[in-house]
Image: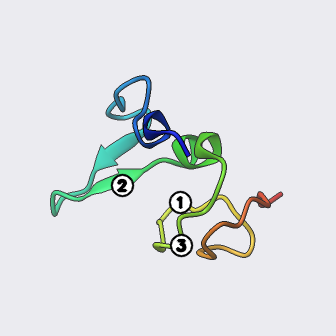
Amino acid sequence: MNIDDYYMSEPLKENVDYYMDPRGFRVMTEKYLRERGYCCGNGCKHCPYFPPHHKGNRELKE
């Protein structure tokens, strides 16, 4: 693993990669989560993987 793997090449774009909910939390969009390529297992609201919320899962919902 390379240290550069931990840092994104581009900063996140609001209303494209995420949006802020009324409580001030950053909510990642399905677009961003698909592009990331794997499930983090944290229960993301827009998790595009099936089954959802299983860390490391790479199978997308149809």
Near mark 1 (Cα within 10 A), the count class, few <14, some 14-19 or many ≥20, is some
Mark 3 and mark 1 lie on one chain; the one further toward the N terminus is 3
What kind of element bears circle 3? Answer: loop
Which kind of residue does numbered mark 3 sit on? Answer: Gly
Which kind of residue does numbered mark 2 sit on? Answer: Val
Q: Disc 1 to disc 2, how far (Cα)?
A: 8 Å
Near mark 2 (Cα within 10 A), the count class, few <14, some 14-19 or many ≥20, is some
Mark 1 and mark 2 lie on one chain; the one further toward the N terminus is 2
Left or right for 4, reference 38: left
**In percent of the image, x 44 and y 24: which residue is there?**
9
Residue that badge 1 annotates: 46
Residue that badge 3 annotates: 41
Q: Disc 3 to disc 1, how far (Cα)?
A: 12 Å
- 7 shown above or below 50: above
Which kind of residue does numbered mark 1 sit on? Answer: His
**In percent of the image, x 16 and y 63: which residue is there?**
23
- 40 shown above or below 53: above
Residue that badge 2 annotates: 27
Mark 3 and mark 2 lie on one chain; the one further toward the N terminus is 2
Left or right for 42, reference 54: left
At which x and y percent is residue 21? 25, 56
Residue 60, by quadrant, is: bottom right
**In percent of the image, x 43 and y 32: which residue is there?**
8
At which x and y percent is residue 58? 74, 59
Q: Nearer the viewer, mark 3 or mark 2?
A: 3
- Is there CB contact under 8 Å for labels 1 and 2? yes
Near mark 3 (Cα within 10 A), the count class, few <14, some 14-19 or many ≥20, is few
Left or right for 19, reference 31: left
